[in-house]
Amino acid sequence: MSAFTPTLFVVSGPSGAGKGTLVAQVRAQRPDLGLTVSATTRQPREGEVDGVNYHFMTRERFDELVRQGAFLEWAHVFDNCYGTLVTEVEKNLAAGHSLILEIDVQGALQVKEKFPEAVLIFIKPPSPEVLRERLVGRGTDAPESVALRLATAERELALADRYDAVIVNDDLTEAVQELLRTLAEHERK
Ligand code: 5GP
């Protein structure tokens, strides 16, 4: 394996761009990548486990952590608060593991400000039409929720040029290879 510097990668992109699946496939091929568990005020979905999927907490506890400066970044996303704990990032980098934070655009830009060496990767859908089809097709969101996600997507897409790399998720297999290449490129000394 070639020498590399542990790197903090941030992946974001609109809901429906397929970033969850993409990152999961990349992780399967890069088991060395560190994992962080974000904090959130949203309710656990069925099957989600506290401390595994998220650290689920009340708004009061979340605000207390904000006051203590425990978050590297945090943001309101679709009516809930989400944040990355500094301790989770530090323990991975100190152990020599690169890591991917899968967070929203507002959070990504905060990370870049505090951590200019972080590498920001934006996952784009091939077109707004495909995004709409994917959001409607997955059937998990009510029509108002689809509309909110599309409006948010438009704002997020406008910020793609602030990212270090943009990957269009048209063909999943190709996008996985491109993300793997992007990670390797930035990790090289
Ligand atoms: P979900 O509720 O579906 O698990 O996540 C909703 C959105 O929250 C995702 O698009 C994800 O990018 C974002 N998110 C998850 N964890 C964090 C975090 O720690 N910080 C920020 N800023 N966004 C997050």
Image: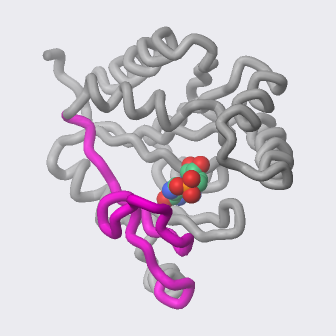
Quadrant of the image occupied by residue 74: bottom right
In the rendered image, the quadrant that contains the N terminus is: top left
Which residue shows up at 39% across the image and 14% down it?
181
| Percent of width and height locating residue 162 | 68, 36
Q: Is residue 33 visible?
A: yes
169 vs 90, left or right, is: right
Image height of 28 relative to 69, above or below: above
Q: Is residue 113 visible?
A: no
Which residue shows up at 17% across the image and 16% down it?
2
Where ligand 1 lies, by image quadrant? bottom right
Image height of 123 relative to 9, above or below: above
Q: Main secondary structure of the magenta part?
A: loop
Given residues 136 and 75, the one toward you in this image is: 136
| Percent of width and height locating residue 62 | 50, 81
95 vs 126, left or right, is: left
80 vs 24, left or right, is: right
Which residue shows up at 39% across the image and 59% down it?
47
Which residue shows up at 72% across the image and 18% down it?
126
85 vs 52, left or right, is: right
The magenta region covers 32-61
- Residue 127 located within the stretch drawn in magenta: no
In the rendered image, the quadrant that contains the C terminus is: top left
| Percent of width and height locating residue 174 | 49, 9
- Residue 54 located within the stretch drawn in magenta: yes
Image height of 46 relative to 27, above or below: below
Given residues 171 and 188, the one toward you in this image is: 171
